[in-house]
């Protein structure tokens, strides 16, 4: 069973994955591709991260969660691999990284009470403030997880 960009939409992911695991035969695989909250890009941005700002994303996991969940689902963790949502050139990765760091910096400064309001009227800063978030699809912020159902005893 394969879930690609699905797990983050599950209000109760453990219950949903347990249900799917019951459909597997012993040795069957549950393959999950989803965002990972332990990615550096996610840790830098916190609540300002594009992935967590989507209202349809209601569950967020990290590799340690899958290790915890696997034992409750009767599965072994076959592999966990950190991946990018899409592969791209170094130039695009640098471009996305710089835009995201600017956006994150802007959002943090905006919340500080001592930052002068004149700063936010400067054209470049005002332009960054109009962004609705930045897609960071070249960051290694996703995880590919392969769970294998163990044989019942």
Image: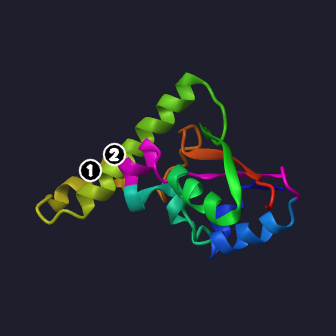
Asked if residue 81 is positioned above or below residue 135 in the image, the reply reads: above
Q: Is label 1 in contact with label 2 (beta carbons under 8 Å)?
A: yes
Count of all numbered marks drawn on residues in the image:
2
Callout 1: SS: loop
Q: Residue 41 in the image: state x and y as whole percent.
A: 44, 44
Q: Residue 20 in the image: state x and y as whole percent.
A: 80, 67
Q: Residue 116 in the image: state x and y as whole percent.
A: 14, 59
Q: For the C terminus, which image quadrant?
A: bottom right
Rendered residue at 26%/50% (across/down): 122
The residue that label 2 is drawn on is 124
Q: In which quadrant of the rendered view does residue 87 lie?
A: top right
Q: Say if the magenta span includes residue 28.
A: yes
Q: Say if the magenta span includes residue 147.
A: no
Q: For the N terminus, which image quadrant?
A: bottom right
Which span of residues is magenta-colored?
Answer: 25-45
Q: In which quadrant of the rendered view does residue 79 lie?
A: top right
The residue that label 1 is drawn on is 122
Q: Residue 54 in the image: state x and y as whole percent.
A: 57, 66
* Foreground pick, 53 / 34: 34
């Amino acid at each position: 069973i394969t879930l690609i960009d699905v797990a983050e939409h599950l209000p109760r992911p453990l219950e949903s994955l347990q249900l799917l695991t019951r459909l597997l035969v012993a040795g069957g695989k549950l393959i999950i591709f989803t965002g990972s909250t332990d990615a550096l890009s996610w840790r830098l941005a916190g609540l300002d991260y594009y992935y967590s700002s989507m209202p349809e994303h209601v569950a967020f996991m990290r590799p340690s969660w899958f290790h915890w969940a696997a034992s409750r689902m009767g599965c072994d963790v076959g592999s966990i691999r950190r991946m990018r949502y899409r592969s791209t050139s170094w130039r695009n990765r640098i471009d996305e990284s710089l835009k995201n760091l600017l956006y994150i910096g802007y959002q943090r400064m905006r919340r500080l009470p001592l930052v002068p309001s004149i700063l936010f009227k400067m054209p470049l800063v005002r332009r960054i403030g109009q962004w609705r978030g930045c897609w960071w699809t070249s960051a290694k912020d996703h995880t590919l997880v392969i769970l294998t159902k163990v044989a019942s005893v």
